[in-house]
Amino acid sequence: MPARRYLRFTLGAAIVTILSAGATACSNATGDTAGSTKPSVGSSGKPIKSMLFVNPLPNYPAWKTIGQCMKAEAQKNGISFSQAGPNGNNMDTKLMLDRLQQGISSKVDALVTFPASAEQFDPIFAQARAAGAYVATVEGGQTKNQNLNAGTSFEQFGQLAAKTVAAKAGQQNIAFLTQGPTGPDATFVDAFKEAAKQYPNIKIIDTRYDGGDVVKTTDLATALMTAHPELNHFVTNEGADTPGIIAAIKQKGRVGKVFLTTNSIYSGSVEGMKAGIVYSFLLQNMCAIGKAPVDALVKLSKGETVPPDIPTPIDFATASTVDSLTKSGDLQ
């Protein structure tokens, strides 16, 4: 999931670092890949007395909320909770893998983390499962050796994005700008396209990919506007692309004529909305993302069946709804 620049949770300037580095809270968000995760059978029934959350950015607001809510939920269930992760604003994959390895060696009953890349995290997940530990991911969806994944559903993300865009008055000529043609990006785009069939004011014009390199975003957005003068709405599931698309619209002199629907309140979306460029952006329930894996693992430990992918609440904010949606603090 390069890291999913979704949150999931891609999630602010710091999350842009994560989401650009490899695998989103978000952002970030589940990849909805059929069969990508399967609930544990062999370890069901084993009680959970200890849990380790390897947090990609423990001090960043969104991920800090996730960690705090996960801790509270674990303690409510009588589980000893610990958290580990880098101290700065950059995700340290090596440190995360090392902390997971330490958790396995210490015989922690349950491990939870954000899997930056399937290639790196799947082997250690398999090792943990073989050692009898439960494994949950948040904002994952690309790895396959966890018991379950909790976070934003990219399918729901795409469907809701289409509904939100369709609510904007007038014809919406859409261009997608995202990381690549596979995985959660494809799930998002495909879900949007399928949902858009019911909205006559949406027309899909083009799709471009930046390969996870946000340095390319402004040039790609500019090229799309040049190639398609009728384009009037960018759509992306990558919060990290927000600044580049905003810059392109400004440079092209298209403010007020071309709009953006994007991901994350932390990626310059609020400022872009005030500037009349961002039409809508995704909000996620970070606390729910923290609680969901704990509750699901507890059920699993009691022998109950749980789904492999657990979607958490999302909504889109527009200029008229952003204040009311964020007032409670549940969505951010």
Image (cartoon, rainbow, N blue to C red):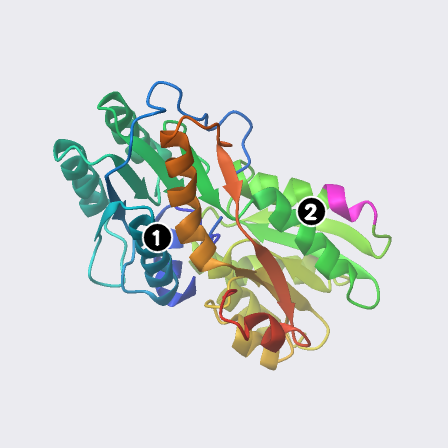
Question: Which residue lies at the image location 44% right of the left edge and 26% below the top edge?
Answer: 39
Whether residue 10 can be seen here: no
How packed mark 1 is, by other alpha carbons closer than 10 Å (few <14, some 14-19, many 20 or more), is many
Answer left or right for 167 relative to 65.
right
Depth check, front residue: 24 or 206: 24
Q: Is residue 196 magenta?
A: yes
Query: Residue 147 appears at what percent x and percent y?
Result: 39, 30
Q: State which region is magenta.
A: 194-198
Question: On the image, which quarter does residue 122 sit in?
Answer: top left
In the drawing, does residue 83 fall left or right of residue 139?
Answer: left
Q: Secondary structure at mark 1?
A: helix
- Whether residue 300 appears in magenta in the rendering, the answer is no
Circle number at residue 192: 2
* Amino acid found under the numbered disc labelled 1: Met
Three-letter code for the amino acid on which mark 2 is drawn: Phe
192 to 173, vertically: above or below: above
Q: Is residue 103 visible?
A: yes
Can you give x and y, in whole percent of width and height, for residue 329 in the image? 49, 70
Query: What separation in Å lies between label 2 and label 1 (alpha carbons)?
Result: 31 Å
Q: Residue at x 46, y 46 (%)?
A: 211
Q: Is residue 115 left or right of residue 54?
A: right
Label ID, residue 70: 1
Q: Nearer the viewer, residue 185 or 51?
A: 51
